[in-house]
Amino acid sequence: NAGVTQTPKFHILKIGQSMTLQCTQDMNHNYMYWYRQDPGMGLKLIYYSVGAGITDKGEVPNGYNVSRSTTEDFPLRLELAAPSQTSVYFCASSYSGGTFNQPQHFGDGTRLSIL
Amino acid sequence: GQQLNQSPQSMFIQEGEDVSMNCTSSSIFNTWLWYKQDPGEGPVLLIALYKAGELTSNGRLTAQFGITRKDSFLNISASIPSDVGIYFCAGPGAGGTSYGKLTFGQGTILTVHP
């Protein structure tokens, strides 16, 4: 009954370092999403994928990269981390588009601080 | 891009009170979603609305899709301590409903005093 699993839960990164946030889902969902949540703000879409091998930019993609080699996994990579990327990152998945009777299921988030 | 504005930003209420919050958009939405985020967890879908004027309930929660299609409302009746959390409205972002790209409001933080 895992759902969407994100690792790590917490991490501190130094400015300029790189890191990959892991996301995996066991529901055989086609659609996967990465959001970031800043304090007092809603979630903003970084990247999304509609299936293995297909990814596209969301609202705030700068400074991030993604890949989708399998249905289950959708890692998010930060290259040259900057303090502005300090945030809570959420991965989500859905069977279809996520709005019509197929809600997006969210992981518990990765809390990332860049110092 | 599209923006969703939620109000109030935060609420402090006593257990047993009713709660009302709303969400307005700068553009027309075809779907409204209400999510709740418990501390330290990801958001969970509470209610989905698909038609203007629609009123939908989920236990003590009732949500309405505004007739203008630019707003939505969420009511919680007889609040209990476990209602604490952040409530988000969301809807399909620019580009329509394809791919499930959602725009989220900034959230309403609810605190319930026993």
Image (cartoon, rainbow, N blue to C red):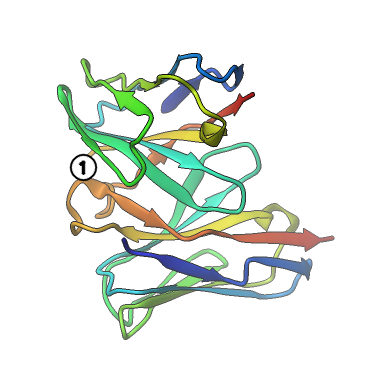
For residue A1, say whether it is visible. Answer: no
Split into 4 quadrants, where in the image is the C terminus of chain B? bottom right
Whether residue A54 is situated above or below residue B93 in the rendered picture: above
For residue A19, say whether it is visible. Answer: yes
Residue type indicated by callout 1: Ser
Q: Position of residue A43 (x, y in %)?
A: 46, 48
Q: Position of residue A12 (x, y in %)?
A: 62, 19
Question: Camera-side residue: A15 or B26?
Answer: A15
Q: Residue at x 35, y 35 (%)?
A: A62
**Left or right: residue A80 compared with residue A28:** right
Residue at the disc numbered 1: A96
Split into 4 quadrants, where in the image is the N terminus of chain B? bottom left
**Left or right: residue A104 compared with residue A89:** left
Q: Residue at x 57, y 31 (%)?
A: A83
Whether residue A43 is situated above or below residue B74 in the rendered picture: above
Q: Position of residue B79 (x, y in %)?
A: 69, 66
